[in-house]
């Protein structure tokens, strides 16, 4: 989520999958060396299969194709002016926003549900009074603190890769503390299967 | 020539295997990691074997059922494989659950973490939500309110396919079941009155969230459609919403218990009297003449939601409440114009097992207001089908609970609309048939051994709001008072969970031989009929006359 573009996002996200797809699918198809149109088609195929890999459901395919569209737009340099003139923080937030839109399709159980969710996000859906309950339950001090902490870790904490390149006692102690904290929290919750088990 | 910065892949390739760390720190990390991996199972094994007297290996073998002849008889090879696989998946799931629950780490940490979360962060857990003024709400009740409409077609479809492989699919549409039930009763010229009781959050949304005002009860988004469809189908509904919503303003005392899912004793009495007034106005009931005595008793207890928080005794004591109940002398009899079907909202203050006193609950006060006794079938949990199923079984056994009835009142908690299994249950009266199953003589306690042919599932104590549960056992190859009766079977009800702890009998498996003290079920029915019971899968065996059993010891 520190990415300044969707292209950069895919260099950071699920690297094993994207690298595999790139090396065994995108490059054999010609990559970006067969002209502009062919490149766009290859991106489309690449992201279609990347979405389909997550599950045989329209919402995963749409998620993949949406990212394909984002990548295609960036490849066509349509957004070049945006990426060169706009401050980094805006680019980062905009990329995050695009990724969030796509995540709605990824996590929704069906296409109608994804569309309903998006409508709610943009204030276009009817909101029953019962939803105010949920709003009230989510916007508590604890939840807001948790979300702010997560945002702090994502955007301001050092990358794990960088942090662990040089391990001194202080960092080891810090890592150990976080590890114990994570184990404690996992222990007191119900069993949550690894989400990628389904894949 | 402009130098390009290397890509992340190039950086990664350069740096793989290069981490600057001293040898001592490296060894420390490896040791810490390996210890972390192996200490937990080693300590757990020691804990199980020496402290719990139940090693993981023993737990593993006890979880998985021994195959019996019944698994092979009259079944095709494919069917045997399929059934065995389904059974295995179910037992694997049970094993994983037991593994999680018996974790020493969990036992060590849960209370401390929960208390910290509650005191310093104002957080409950997955089952209990801490609202305003330290009011506790059952999370499933809140989910009823804010989740997808329970009549939404996508939601109905999702629920109908949400069962595990070893479970039967549920029937999620309440409307279908209610109309069917109404039609079945109409064949006997009996009317149906629905009594859906709102869950706490419906009446007290302002105690769930701060800084928001609500002008009316906050139901699930399908509620209005549900009521409208019932009106079109001419199903009578007594709406307790409006009565309870204004209760606190009028009476200056809450309508619900602070730390429990249920209503207060005062609110129970109030709604009962309001319902009685409605019944007198709407239905042609013969005037009652029964005379009841009332005694006021104070009861102190802790709410069921508080128990879900896994707190220590000091913090838990903050959630005790005291209520005044009015005990009504007199119990239900079969000769009554009204058959009342209810769940824990009717059981509270009525059944001692719930811990809030007895004989002072909803049905007692309704009977008092109507001046007539009621025929009552009440069971905690599963208000969507449990009491209808009990009624159906009575009819199939030849016991006509509907004889002489003009009205059936069906009470259930509204959360059942979103989560219940609304089975379609026919009401077929059969002539009583002599049963080959053994029943203990009334008034006696008989020692009986037998092999468990089938035993019903117990709930996961951590997952359910109720404290007690009865298991059902099909016992075969009996030995009665030392005499073998090889071809005789018995149906036994026994307490499988008490105060959220599974009893020894709940841990028994098919194929095991056990010894029980049996009594005629009807000798103990008044004590235990209100407790939720897990039925057997075999519907035919379920119709046999039951016994009440208490485990003596087991023979292997």
Image: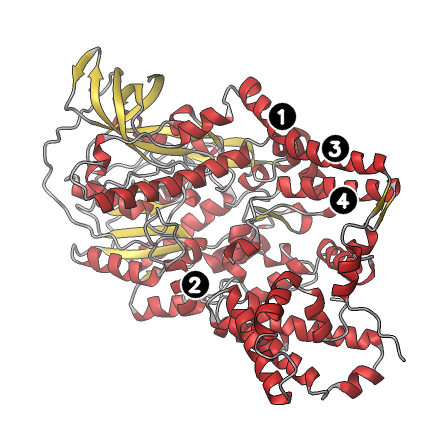
Q: Using the image, determine if residue B44 lies above or below residue A144.
A: above
Of residues A14 and B436, the one nearer the viewer is A14
- Between discs 2 and 1, the one toward the N terminus: 1
The residue lying at 73 percent from left, 53 percent from top is A142
Q: Using the image, determine if residue B139 lies above or below residue B313.
A: below
Say whether marks 2 and 4 touch (CB < 8 Å). Answer: no
Q: Which residue is identified by label 4?
A: A178
Q: Mark 3 and mark 1, same subunit? A: yes
The residue lying at 16 percent from left, 57 percent from top is B187
Q: Is residue B307 left or right of residue B381?
A: right
x and y percent of residue B318 in the render? 66, 35
Image quarter in which the N terminus of chain A is found: bottom right
Numbered disc 2: secondary structure: loop
Numbered disc 4: secondary structure: helix
The residue lying at 45 percent from left, 24 percent from top is B58
Using the rendered image of the protein, determine whether residue B462 is visible from the camera's viewpoint. Answer: yes
Of residues B282 and A64, the one nearer the viewer is A64
Q: Which residue is identified by label 1?
A: B43
Of residues B35 and B211, the one nearer the viewer is B35
Q: Which residue is identified by label 3?
A: B31
Task: Give the Cα distance between marks 3 and 4.
Answer: 17 Å
């Amino acid at each position: 989520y520190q990415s300044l573009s969707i292209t950069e996002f895919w260099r950071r996200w699920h690297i094993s999958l994207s690298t595999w797809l790139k090396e065994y699918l995108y490059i054999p198809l010609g990559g970006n060396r067969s002209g502009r149109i062919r490149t766009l088609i290859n991106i489309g195929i690449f992201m279609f299969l990347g979405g389909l890999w997550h599950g045989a459901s329209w919402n995963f395919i749409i998620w993949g194709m949406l990212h394909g569209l984002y990548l295609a737009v960036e490849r066509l340099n349509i957004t070049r002016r945006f990426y060169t003139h706009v401050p980094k923080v805006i680019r980062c937030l905009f990329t995050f926003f695009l990724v969030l839109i796509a995540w709605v399709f990824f996590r929704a159980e069906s296409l109608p549900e994804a569309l309903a969710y998006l409508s709610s996000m943009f204030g276009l859906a009817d909101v029953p009074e019962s939803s105010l309950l949920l709003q009230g339950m989510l916007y508590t001090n604890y939840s807001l603190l948790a979300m702010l902490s997560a945002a702090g870790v994502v955007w301001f904490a050092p990358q794990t890769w960088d942090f662990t390149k040089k391990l001194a006692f202080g960092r080891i102690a810090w890592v150990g503390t976080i590890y114990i904290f994570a184990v404690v929290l996992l222990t007191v919750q119900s069993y949550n299967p690894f989400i990628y088990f389904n894949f | 020539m402009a130098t390009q910065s290397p890509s992340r892949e190039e950086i990664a390739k350069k740096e793989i295997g290069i981490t600057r760390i001293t040898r001592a720190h490296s060894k420390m990390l490896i040791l810490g990691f390996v210890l972390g991996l192996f200490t937990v199972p080693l300590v757990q094994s020691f804990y199980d074997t020496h402290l719990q007297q139940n090693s993981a290996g023993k737990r593993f073998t006890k979880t998985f059922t021994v195959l019996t002849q019944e698994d092979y008889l009259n079944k095709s090879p494919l069917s045997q494989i399929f059934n065995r696989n389904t059974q295995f998946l179910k037992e694997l799931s049970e094993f994983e659950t037991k593994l999680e629950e018996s974790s020493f780490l969990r036992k060590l940490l849960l209370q401390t973490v929960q208390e910290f979360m509650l005191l310093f962060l104002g957080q409950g857990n997955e089952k209990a939500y801490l609202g305003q003024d330290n009011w506790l709400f059952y999370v499933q009740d809140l989910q009823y309110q804010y989740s997808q409409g329970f009549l939404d077609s996508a939601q109905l479809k999702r629920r109908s396919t949400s069962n595990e492989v070893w479970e039967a699919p549920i029937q999620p549409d309440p409307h279908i079941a209610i109309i069917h039930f109404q039609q079945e009763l109409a064949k006997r010229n009996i009317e149906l009155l629905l009594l859906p009781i709102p869950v706490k959050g419906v009446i007290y949304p302002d105690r769930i969230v701060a800084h928001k005002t609500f002008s009316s009860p906050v139901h699930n988004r399908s509620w209005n459609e549900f009521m409208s469809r019932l009106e079109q189908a001419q199903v009578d509904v007594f709406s307790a919403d409006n009565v309870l919503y204004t209760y606190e303003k009028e009476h200056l005392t809450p309508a619900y218990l602070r730390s429990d899912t249920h209503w207060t004793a005062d609110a129970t009495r109030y709604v009962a009297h309001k319902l009685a007034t409605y019944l007198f106005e709407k239905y042609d009931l013969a005037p009652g003449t029964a005379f009841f005595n009332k005694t006021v008793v104070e009861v102190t207890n802790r709410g069921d939601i508080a128990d879900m928080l896994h707190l220590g005794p000091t913090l838990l004591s903050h959630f005790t409440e005291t209520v005044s109940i009015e005990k009504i002398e007199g119990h239900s009899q079969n000769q009554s114009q009204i058959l009342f079907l209810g769940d824990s909202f009717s059981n509270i203050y009525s059944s001692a097992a719930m811990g809030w006193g007895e004989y002072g609950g909803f049905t007692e006060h309704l009977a008092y207001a109507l001046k007539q006794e009621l025929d009552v079938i009440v069971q905690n949990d599963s208000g969507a089908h449990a009491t209808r199923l009990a009624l159906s079984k009575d009819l199939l056994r030849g016991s006509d609970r509907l004889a002489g009835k003009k009205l059936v009142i069906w009470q259930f908690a509204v959360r059942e609309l979103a989560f219940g299994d609304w089975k379609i249950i026919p009401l077929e009266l059969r002539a009583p048939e002599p049963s080959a199953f053994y029943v203990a003589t009334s008034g006696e306690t008989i020692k009986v051994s037998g092999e468990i042919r089938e035993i019903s599932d117990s709930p996961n104590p951590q997952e359910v709001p109720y404290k007690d549960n009865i298991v059902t056992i099909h016992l075969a190859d009996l030995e009665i008072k030392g005499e073998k009766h090889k071809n005789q079977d018995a149906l036994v009800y026994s307490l499988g969970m008490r105060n959220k702890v599974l009893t020894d009998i709940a841990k028994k498996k098919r194929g095991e031989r056990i010894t029980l003290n049996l009594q005629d079920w009807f000798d103990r029915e008044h004590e235990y009929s209100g407790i939720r019971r897990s039925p057997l899968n075999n519907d035919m065996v379920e119709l046999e006359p039951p016994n009440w059993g208490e485990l003596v010891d087991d023979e292997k």
